[in-house]
Image (spheres, rainbow, N blue to C red):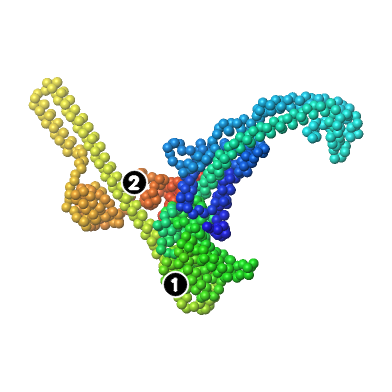
Amino acid sequence: MISKEILEKLEYPKVIAQIEKYCATESGKKLVLEMLPKYGLDEIQTENLRVHEAKEILIRNEEPPFEYLPDLHETLSHSKIQGVVLTAKQIIDVLHLAQQSRKLYQFLKPKDDEAETNLKELLTQLFIDKVFEHHFSKVFDDNGEIKDTASAKLREIRVDIREREASLQKLVQRLLRQLSDSYLVQEEFVTQRDGRIVLPIKAEHKRHVRGFVHSESATGQTVYIEPEETLEMNNEILSLHFAEKREIEKILRDLTEKIGGHNIALKLSLEAIAALDSIFARAKYSIAVIGTHPSYFLNKPFELIDARHPLLVRRLGHSKTVPMNLKLKDEKVVLITGPNAGGKTVTLKTCGLLVCLAQAGIPIPVFPDSNFHIFEKVLVDIGDAQSIEDDLSTFSSHLTNIRNIIEAADDKSLVLLDEIGTGTDPAEGSAIAVGVLVTLRDNGARVLATTHHGSLKLVANQLEEFQNASMEFDTDELKPTYRFKQGMPGSSYAFEVAQRIGFDDEFINLAKQYLDTDKTKIEEFLVSLEKKSQDLRDQLNKSELENLRLKGLANLYQDKVEKLEKQKKEILSDTHEKAQMYLKDVNKQIEDTIKNIRESQAQKEVVKQEKEKIELLKKETKRILPQKPKVEFDKKEFKVGDYASIVNTATAGVIEEFDAEKNKAVLLVGSLKIKTKISDLQPAKKSEAELVYKKKYESDYQNLNFRLDLRGMRYEDAEFELTKFLDEANMNGVDRVEILHGKGTGVLKQMTHGILRTNSSVKNFYFSGIESGGDGITIVEFK
């Protein structure tokens, strides 16, 4: 079991508190606050499927009808106790529970009765009883007050009260006027004391008014007297109010008994609503952090892909939070080195926190292909463990904690150790650290540990199932980048950090004189290695982007060639059709001419001459007009390596692939590969091919699309289409384009922004305005 103390160290409760704010019901909030990691694969996957389904509903802009609902467990329990009568407010809360159950069921039930839903089990628990609702609704109005029509007797009592109160008011007003005329009242108004109508009489005249004195003012100048004439009426009205109260209690008792009769069903419904509330709260949190659920394949490596600390995502934003990647295949121990304040501790916490959240059924900000293992224990030694109460130093406290970790660790444990071996002599601390890490490895635990001890870097490189890792440091800017790098140790960059803080070169050189020579060489080697690693990574990124760009251009060029070929055939076909119509018209004119000649009784010789002229006209017309294109399959005697060009185009290059049987060839034009038919090729010279490659490719600007829709595409397809689209737009001098990636899980958005950040032709990019699509659309401006 993962202890609450460990969860607090990993800041798990802070994430839970953020999710709790998305809940509408008190029971839902309580359920979220009590959420802990689970250890059964089926249980975890069930929760994940439910949250994923809820997220899909929210993405469709459908908001479930959750409303505030207090925790009614105690209320429902009391309804079963003999003689207990619930208050009107408690009964109204139960009515709201029944109403919300019905509304949620109607909202969440599948539109198709045959359709499956991961929420089915919870939906079947929801209390649906319209008769029950109607019985309660006819008692209370919209303001929660009991209606006169709640019972026939209550209506009769209230009508009687209103009539008597009206009569009493008339009598009191008459008395007030009389006393006012005699200057006996202090003020001309009527008030109540103890539920009875009284008059404010001047103290010096109280003996002139017969009645019952209820009270007097603070100054003693006014006494409040119930006149003798109103005593009987007041008594009658008071008796009616007592009767009203008894009738209301009878009604509430009846409703309490009905609630008690449905006690179990209502409790199940309350629990289902709480569960649904917590599921949708997690779904809303998932959208907020661009979260997802990792897979759980125990036969595959534990792998974090583009993992981010969820608290940093909420504070800095998804794009500004540096992601980490970690893959544990055969490695049991990963030793992390690097500069101070470089992110080593955050890396440990990120890994531990994400494991705990994922096992609790909470979406986490990782790439969907991430794969986790289920850990029954997460054991942590992070932070200053000094104990004043037990009179232990920091080092002793750490050792005590580590001893407990060693005793508890097994093959289902994830162990996180921060700054292992510090707080004592470096040599002895390093030796103890190695002993701890080897013991944990032998216990089968997965271990992530950070350290500044240089000797441990060499040990990690020599021991089985150990691996070095580091936090990247920008040697040009002299500051950490917070990027996690697996497989390579890192320097602590103490001198570089000191230099950045402001220590001059003289001091730095002085300090270096007291550094062990071998250690100096190791640190210098690590710094040099880091620099080369950065350079190689930059070159690799540029090569990958250039490769994507060239692939995009190749496909774009191929599409353009095919498009032009199609246009050419369409033009020829259209021209041929027009020519046939022209010939038909000419033939008609000829026939008309002959007809006219005959009708004019012309001589045969004249007719013959006219026909000859007409035949010459037909032949000339056929010679001038183009013939309908024919698809020919001519197996030219080409071979791989020959220079060739595509007929009726300026495209020339070297034949790289050749298949005479299928009439297919691949033409290499510069670095672009173009598929074509052999029948469309003609011999070319080497100089022609080189000239074509040097010419700038010009696309049809009029047919350029200024918006790219990536929604629904697979990651690889979207990546290719985006690169192709950006190159085409840039080549045509477009200033601004839009990329529609949607909101969804955020994967396409991440990929889009990643490519835009590294594209040298992009000047700026930002989300569209809320009214135009918000963060579902990215606007791109070119240089």
Q: Report the front residue among 206 and 689.
A: 206
Determine whether 512 is above or below 190 in the image: below
- Quick check: can you spot residue 434? yes
The image quadrant of residue 566 is top left
Labelled disc at residue 700: 2
Amino acid at dot 2: Asp
The image quadrant of residue 193 is top right
Relative to 250, 338 lies left or right: left
Amino acid at dot 1: Leu
Identify which residue is drawn at 50% across, 47% down.
283
Label 2 sits on a secondary structure element that is loop
Kindly check if marks 1 and 2 are in contact, taking CB atoms under 8 A apart as contact. no
The 10 Å Cα crowd at callout 2, few under 14, some 14 to 19, many 20 or more, is few
Q: Which residue is mark 1?
A: 458
Identify which residue is drawn at 54% across, 43% down.
272
Q: Could you give the CA–CA distance between mark 1 and mark 2, rounded to whole angstroms? A: 60 Å
Q: Residue furthest left?
A: 605
Q: Report the front residue among 539 and 416.
A: 416
**Mark before the other along the chain sequence, 1 or 2:** 1
Identify which residue is drawn at 86% across, 33% down.
213
Residue 575, given in percent of the width and then of the height, sits at 24, 37
Label 1 sits on a secondary structure element that is helix
Q: Report the front residue among 539 and 140.
A: 140
Identify which residue is drawn at 65% across, 29% down.
150
Residue 728, given in percent of the width and then of the height, sits at 36, 50
